[in-house]
Image (cartoon, grey):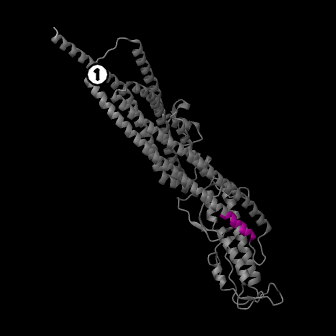
């Protein structure tokens, strides 16, 4: 009964990893750095996050070929070297791997001594209780030998073990509260990262949709690019919805497990504290029948709490193994590890695909703007060629710098005289003119309507262009590595320490109550014999007095 709920804790960290696994990763790594914020098309800012890898699969041309070290790297190798009962008690050498039954068998074996203690206690003490019952029921002649030393020592030890049980309950209660806070904090951080990802997925999707609608002087992007945008946008929206639903559902389930385990541990602490307290007072007050009832109840509860100790020792080891595994995974980005089965960070082709589409859309948007500037605004058409003519005059409008070159979408440096996304709208404002009936009445080469269309194109292109580092982090695992780095440095010390508090508290409670049970029986026996001897002494003194009066 006492050990059923905590087994759910074994699924806590894997569930957190499943939450993280819905972020898409891949490839290269630089030391974790906090993500910069990027503006979207309407001027808002959101932290850079990662897209799910499947969002951009099968949507771009030939992938980039990059060699990766495929040699398996054992995570937390030194810490996870334990005996494996499924492999003839040989030492397990596979490292941290939650999908490997031998890992779970080896880490579970660390709790074997406590499980053995529970079994031995349940068997031996149960047999002892049975023999005591048989002795008192079948043997008519009873010995009432009494020792003042045994009586005093049993009372002293009973008091000491009762205090130890209270101290253990306090450590257990404090530990479960701290552990609940640490696990909830870790989970909330992961969910926050997931929500941040959802927001950026949707913002990126909105920017792509806006890019498809952008037109400057009735010039739009090519139809094939718009078709690719539709395809990518569908995957983005599907991925955002999936990510949001999975993170919400998993978060709720894990929070429910954490709340249940917390309540369960509080009940365990309260029950064991009440048991120790009542057992002590019933023994002191000589309520022998109630003491024996508590002994039977305590016999079962102590066995259960020892099993619970083993479970939480297992949990503590899994937490410590996982923290070390995450830290080593962050430090070895190019090596194949067990975490790649959950967070496959080796698909450079997908990274190339997603980046290519982002660059292509940016390139085409800049192209649309520059075509209008080159073919309309910066040409002095004669008055008869309307709508190309609207009385353009004055200095030529500088072109918008295209950060990429066709067809490979390689990075490109701006030429002298070009404006970039950051200052284009401000510079172009100086080339605008006032109009009347669609014709400029003042010097300038850009009408207000054309200026607004160009500004909209720049805002959308600026947003999509600044998703380039975002898409790099999408596939190179920077986001997940940064998340893991934060968890290992900020959350793991508390998780390891507080899970150990629970384990220590349970061991203290189990051992103290176990010994208290023994001394309940011993003290009850000594108190009963002391009481019997006092009565016998009173009867003997009474008989002697009568003999003196009536010789």
Q: Residue at x 74, y 75 (%)?
A: 368
> Helix, strand or loop at disc 1?
helix
Asked whether residue 54 is in view, the answer is yes
Decide which of 361, 410 is in the foreground and name it: 361
Residue range highlighted in magenta: 203-213
Picture mark count: 1
Quadrant in the picture for the C terminus? top left
Q: Residue at x 57, y 66 (%)?
A: 37
Location of residue 56 in the rendering, given as x and y in whole percent from the top left corner:
70, 58
The part of the image, by quadrant, that contains residue 538 is: top left
Q: Residue at x 39, y 39 (%)?
A: 168
Per the image, the residue denoted by label 1 is 530
Q: Measured along the vertical axis of the image, is residue 187 above or below residue 78? A: below
- Determine if the magenta segment contains residue 209: yes
Decide which of 360, 464 is in the foreground and name it: 464
Q: Measured along the vertical axis of the image, is residue 338 above or below residue 364? A: above
Q: Which is the main secondary structure of the residues drawn in magenta? A: helix
Query: In the shown orientation, is residue 227 left or right of residue 171?
Result: right
Q: Residue at x 45, y 46 (%)?
A: 498
Extreme residue in the top direction: 551
């Amino acid at each position: 009964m006492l050990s059923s709920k905590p087994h759910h804790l074994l699924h806590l960290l894997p569930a957190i990893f499943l939450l993280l696994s819905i972020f898409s990763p891949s490839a290269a790594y630089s030391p974790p750095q906090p993500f910069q914020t990027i503006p979207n098309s309407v001027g808002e800012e959101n932290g850079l996050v990662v897209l799910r890898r499947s969002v951009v699969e099968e949507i771009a041309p030939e992938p980039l070929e990059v060699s990766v070290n495929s040699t398996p790297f054992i995570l937390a190798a030194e810490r996870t070297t334990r005996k494996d009962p499924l492999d003839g008690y040989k030492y397990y050498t596979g490292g941290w791997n939650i999908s490997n039954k031998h890992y779970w068998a080896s880490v579970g074996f660390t709790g074997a001594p406590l499980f053995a203690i529970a079994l031995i206690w349940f068997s031996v003490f149960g047999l002892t209780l049975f023999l005591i019952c048989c002795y008192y029921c079948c043997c008519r002649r009873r010995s009432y030998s009494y020792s003042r030393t045994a009586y005093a020592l049993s009372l002293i030890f009973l008091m000491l073990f009762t205090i130890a049980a209270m101290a253990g309950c306090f450590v257990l209660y404090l530990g479960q509260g701290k552990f609940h806070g640490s696990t909830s904090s870790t989970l909330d951080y992961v969910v926050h990262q997931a929500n941040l990802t959802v927001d950026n997925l949707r913002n990126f999707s909105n920017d792509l949709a806006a890019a498809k609608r952008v037109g400057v002087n009735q010039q739009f992007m090519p139809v094939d690019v718009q078709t690719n945008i539709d395809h990518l946008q569908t995957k983005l929206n599907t991925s955002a919805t999936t990510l949001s639903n999975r993170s919400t559902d998993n978060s709720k389930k894990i929070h429910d497990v954490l709340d249940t385990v917390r309540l369960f541990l509080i009940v365990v602490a309260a029950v064991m504290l009440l048991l120790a307290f009542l057992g002590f007072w019933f023994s002191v007050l000589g309520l022998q029948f109630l003491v024996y009832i508590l002994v039977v109840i305590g016999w079962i509860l102590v066995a259960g709490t020892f099993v619970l100790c083993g479970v939480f020792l297992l949990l503590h080891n899994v937490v410590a193994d996982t923290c070390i595994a995450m830290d080593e995974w962050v430090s070895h980005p190019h090596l194949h590890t067990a975490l790649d089965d959950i967070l496959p960070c080796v698909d450079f082709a997908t990274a190339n695909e997603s980046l290519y589409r982002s660059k292509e859309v940016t390139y085409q948007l800049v192209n649309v703007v520059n075509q209008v500037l080159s073919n309309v605004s910066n040409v002095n058409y004669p008055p008869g060629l309307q709508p190309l003519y609207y009385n353009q005059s004055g200095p030529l409008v500088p072109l918008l710098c295209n950060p990429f070159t066709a067809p490979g979408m390689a990075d490109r440096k701006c030429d002298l005289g070009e404006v970039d996304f950051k200052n284009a709208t401000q510079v172009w404002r100086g080339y605008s003119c006032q109009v009347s009936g669609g014709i400029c009445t003042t010097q300038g080469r850009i009408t207000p309507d054309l200026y607004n269309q160009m500004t909209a194109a720049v805002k959308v292109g600026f947003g999509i262009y600044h998703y380039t580092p975002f898409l790099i982090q999408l596939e190179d695992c920077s986001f997940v590595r940064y998340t893991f780095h934060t968890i290992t440095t900020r959350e793991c010390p508390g998780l390891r320490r507080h899970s150990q508090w629970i384990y220590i508290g349970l061991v203290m409670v189990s051992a103290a109550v176990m010994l208290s049970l023994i001394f309940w029986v011993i003290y009850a026996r000594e108190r009963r014999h002391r009481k019997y001897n006092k009565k016998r002494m009173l009867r003997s003194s009474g008989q002697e007095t009568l003999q003196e009066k009536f010789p």
